[in-house]
Amino acid sequence: MKLTDEQQRVLNGSDGEVRQKMLRLLVQLGRLYDASELVPVKSVQVAGVSYKSISEPGLTFLEDFARKGAYVSVPTYTNPAGIDVVAWREIGFPEAFAGKQLRILRAFEAMGAALSLTCTPYLAGNTPGFGDHIAWSESSAVCFANSVLGARTNREGGPSALAAAICGVTPNYGLHQDENRYPEVIIEVDTELRNTTDFGTLGYFVGKEVQHRVPYLRGVPEADTEQLKMMGAAMAASGSLSLFHVENVTPEAGLVPTEGRPVVKVSKTDLDQTRASLNRGKRDVDIIMLGCPHASIKELHMVSECLKGRRLKRPLWICTSRAVRTLAVDAGLVRGIEAAGGKVLADTCAVVAPIEEMGIHTSGVNSGKSAHYLPGLCKQDVVYRSMEELIEEQT
Ligand code: F3S
């Protein structure tokens, strides 16, 4: 692997132990994947922020690392934490958990990372450009950045993202290179997609079918930001892919070769069966959980419209970034949602919050990704419906 003189000096310890270790990690990773060089990254997004995900060893590691002087050298953003940092007491998050979580956030802050605490940084001011090299971790954000924005990132693990943040570079392999962004399978969609949840259901089906291969979707004439983020998140949950193309919709679809690829057809029956497989819970939910991936201002607007003139029989949480929540407060959307009995939470999400310790057992969700993870990670029965259906049933 070709290293610059400066990188060689850092490897020899010129900038201290932390940068030396982090660069060594990136070089080892690059050698493993036959990378020719390290490329500079414009931003980093670090997952593994919730105490629920990283627990005591992760907390100790981060505090120790911050104490040793670790500091980021490029704009670095953080994934959701396990609590709403401002309203955790009012919402009822366990005190002991919140204490540990706040220590993790202080460690990230000491390292210079922005406490954006969101899986949709691209809706909160960190929007990479087409062709930009970045090093992001959160699977749904990685899928969105590669597919919808045309940026370039592999799905980084916690340590490799942190190393990229500190060194400002990442190994040039995988989705950083043109040839690995070409489609490997064509998906022909032969069914109507009526709402955002249908896009998530399609994404879940496609992820299961293609696993790590890059899919190229035909038969989806249009899709908005919310539908694409929901679809990509579900694909990345049921498969391990980090890039998709949609003909005439996503920016690289017209630039990549498609000839000779195997074809998978998707019918209404496929989506009905996928929906049924995700819908494992009782009808009577303890809570409605929306905002996976974190809600956009448009989604908050749609929820607020749907709740107009209604009163919820069960609690409803919509998770979003603090930046979007602030906009929604100013736009009067949070007031409207709260008037119906809902809450708009920032900084966290149903999957990384300790909801199973908070008396919540059955969650109503509209997201394929949360329907996938909530049973295993949060011991939830899941009712999987569109946002409109969930609200209709609980008002
Ligand atoms: Fe985001 Fe949490 Fe879903 S991190 S993608 S809201 S599981």
Image (spheres, rainbow, N blue to C red):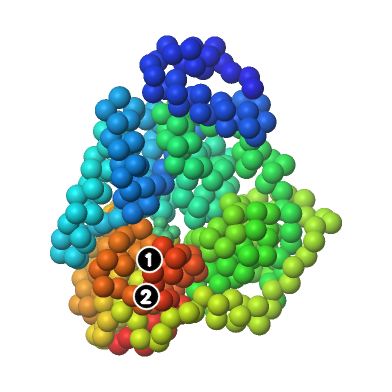
Which of the two discs, 1 and 2, labels the residue nearer the N terminus?
A: 2
Left/right of residue 1 with respect to residue 284 in the rendered view = right
Q: Provide the secondary structure element on which disc 1 rests.
A: helix
Q: Residue 124, relative to residue 232: is it above or below?
A: above
Of labels 1 and 2, the one closer to you = 1
Q: Residue at x 27, y 81 (%)?
A: 314
Disc tally is: 2
In this view of the protein, which residue sits in the foreground, 58 or 144? 58
Q: Is residue 217 above or below residue 280?
A: above
Question: Relative to residue 168, is residue 38 drawn left or right?
Answer: right
Image position of 124 (left or right of 272): left
Amino acid type at circle 1 is Cys
Seen as rendered, the residue at the extreme right is 260
Residue at 74% of width from left, 59% of height from top? 185
For the residue pair 319 and 283, the one nearer the viewer reads as: 283
Q: Residues within 10 Å of mark 1 (few under 14, many from 20)?
A: many
Residue 320, image quadrant: bottom left
Quadrant occupied by the N terminus? top right
Q: x, y percentage for residue 302?
A: 37, 73
Residue 303 visible here: no
On the image, the x and y values in percent for residue 265 come to 73, 72
Q: Residue furthest front?
A: 57
Inspect the image, locate mark 2, and give the three-letter code of the amino acid beneath it. Answer: Ser
Residue corresponding to mark 2:
363
* Ligand 1 quadrant assignment: bottom left
Circles 1 and 2 in contact, beta carbons < 8 Å: yes
Residue 166's place in the image compared with 281, above or below, is above
Circle on res. 378: 1
Q: Which image quarter: residue 286? A: bottom left
Q: Quadrant of the C terminus?
A: bottom left
Q: Is residue 259 visible?
A: yes
